[in-house]
Amino acid sequence: MSDDAPGRPDLPDPDGPAGRSGAPAVAEGVPGVADGAPGGGLVEALELLGLRLGQVELPLEGTGVAEARAVRRQAVEQLDDYLLPRLRAVAAPVLAVLGGSTGAGKSTLVNSLLGAPVSTAGVLRPTTRWPVLVHHPLDGRWFTTDRVLPGLARLVADRGTSRAVDGGTPDTTGTAAGHAGLRLVASDAVPQGLALLDAPDIDSVVDENRALARQLLGAADLWLFVTTAARYADAVPWELLATAAQRRVELALVLDRVDPGEEDAVRTHLTAMLAEHGLGGTPVLVVPEVEPEDGLLPGWAVAPVAEWLTRLAADPAARRGVVERTRDGLVADLVVRAGLVADAADAQEAADARLRAAVRTAYGAALVDVERATSDGRLLRGEVLARWQDVVGTGEFMRSVEERVARWRDRLTSAVRGRRAEEPALADAIGRSLDAVVLDAAEQAAERAYAAWRSDPGGAALLDGLALSRSSARLREEIAAQVRAWQDDVLALVADEGADRRTQARALSFGVNGLGAALMLAVFASTGGLTGAELGIAGGTAVLAQRLLEAVFGDDAVRRLTQSAHERLLARVHGVLDAEAARFTAQLDALGTADAGGAGVRAAAARVAAVPVLDTPSTVPGADGAAGSPAPGHGDDASPARTGALRGVGARRPGARPDGPSPAEAPAAGGLRGWWRRVTGRDEDAR
């Protein structure tokens, strides 16, 4: 069958404004579509919301994050698969998606409505990933483009053969290629303006099929949910029906395989359940239990469904009402979902800040430990003290404590100049002590940060596979390099300060290293943390070193040099600790959650909610086949070139009155049965 429609000025071109260009279509008489109308603003607002949702990532684990990710995915699918394509092609046919549980009889129902086997039924259905979309031949071009479900490939069935759209490879099952698509079938049995899509089972044993079923239902203008008299109270169908209520999507329910005589009782019970679940007023179309003939149910059995769908297709106002109510319901639901995503994005930003604060606290404490250890006298003990005494001489040192400061300077200057071989040992001892202090602080910081992240759901997931509980392997080398660089800084400070005092500089031309060591000791010049004899020895060491520096450079200069040397030490240690902390924060930087707040999503959702929406009167057929308010122009639309009818229309159950259908089987006063005769020139029963 050809799906082209040449010479049809009244059929919008899917490849034009409503097709691949992405520009909104302009449909005369459809509110909210033309430029400047509410729908045009709605498209722009939804596009912005889609952009903002696409920018949101929720990579950090936490309470409710999995649900928020699902909400975000569903919101994006609602936009991409339905809302934006539908708003850009408002004149496209109504897409009715048949969904239901395994064995509900969806495919048999579709085949029976069309009078031909177009959708595979039976035990192989759970593996089918190319669901069938049946449309009128003149509506084909709406579906070969990306007007609906743009992410799915297309396979066009034509006279028993298949060809892929856009040069793809035909595959009627999709299992070989491992991907899903739509198999398009053109049929004269489908009224123009209506398309039927047989979705996979919502409880399929294959995860991909269940996901595809929900995606297809999300792209529908109308849900035709099929269940059976034996299983309509199962939990799985009601979970999906709750989604329909939440989205306020147009819905009709087909109750299949109802035992004769039980129709009223089962319908009454199901109608009450629908009302309890917020779905009151949902049409319930009953298909009786009957044995198929050649795989097809008789026309009278599917007549209620066929009549309901054909009435919908025949009434432009009803079709427009279905589209607009589903659209408006999904827009309202999308605004709610966007709010949930925005809240989740805010939570991600808060989690990022919380994890960074834990690292900052751990390594900040490490820097405080180093600062305290380098100023409370702890370093003026052990090997450092021994090497200092080697420089000045133990006995000389003890005697000089009781002598005048001038003589301390003379003796120490002479000792420093005369015993330069001992100075490198003192510097090395200071360096090793500093190395140990900084390394111990970094190790403790890594342990604290690791413990904090391990107790946080977001951080725990990031730690997997990373050795962050200990410092990095090259940390010891890096600390040693920075401490040696600091010692060079100290010597440079002494040399720069001595350059302005030429006399002292000449006198101490061989004592810069010794003065540098004295300045390092002065940096550690507090007696905090020392006790007993150690206090007197180390305290005297600090005083002696400071007095020597004061005698050479003056009090103010020594205070300035000491402060500068200590600041330079802490700056280098800070750099080392920052590099260690970055091993943690780099994981967050890669995720980009620092600026993951939901303000942008929330603002875009508010813009969508602010677009005015016009109410549409209900004209959808009721459960008994009676249509709502007739739309103007109904008779004009029902021309032979624009209509068709499903197989069950006009069919009579055995034993029905020969002079015409009952009110429940066909409309009164020249309804669908008479309409079918006018269109085709023959009775449907004669087919």
Image (cartoon, grey):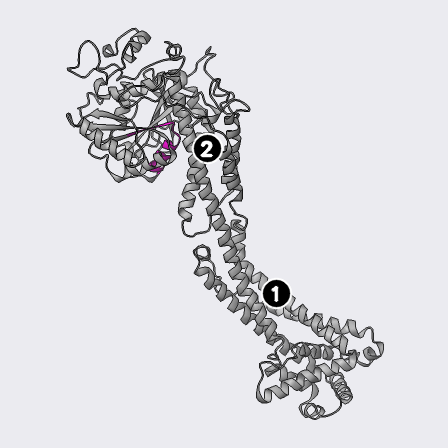
Please give the range of residues in magenta: 208-225
- Residue 54, numbered circle: none
Q: Mark 1 points at which residue?
A: 574
Quadrant of the image occupied by residue 365: bottom right
Alpha-carbon distance for marks 2 and 1? 49 Å
Quadrant of the image occupied by residue 165: top left
Q: Which residue is drawn at 39% across and 17% down?
A: 316
Q: Is the magenta stretch mostly helix, strand or loop?
A: helix
Q: In the displayed structure, does residue 342 sit left or right of residue 531?
A: left
Q: Which residue is drawn at 76% across and 75% down?
A: 557
Residue sitting nearer the eye, 201 or 300: 300
Q: Name the residue under label 2.
A: 80
Q: Where is residue 60 in the image (x, y as percent from the top left)?
A: 46, 51
Q: In the displayed structure, does residue 5 sit left or right of residue 371?
A: left
Locate the N terminus by quadrant: top left
Residue 225 visible from this viewpoint: yes
Q: Position of residue 15 (x, y in %)?
A: 49, 21
Q: Where is residue 500 in the image (x, y as percent from the top left)?
A: 83, 73
Q: How many marks?
A: 2
Quadrant of the image occupied by residue 551: bottom right
> Per the image, is 216 magenta?
yes
Which amino acid is tagged 1?
A: His
Q: Position of residue 140 (x, y in %)?
A: 41, 19
Q: Circle 1 — which element?
A: helix
Q: Circle 2 — which element?
A: helix
> Per the image, is 531 magenta?
no
Q: In the displayed structure, does residue 413 sit left or right of residue 281?
A: right
Residue sitting nearer the eye, 235 or 567: 235
Which amino acid is tagged 2?
A: Asp
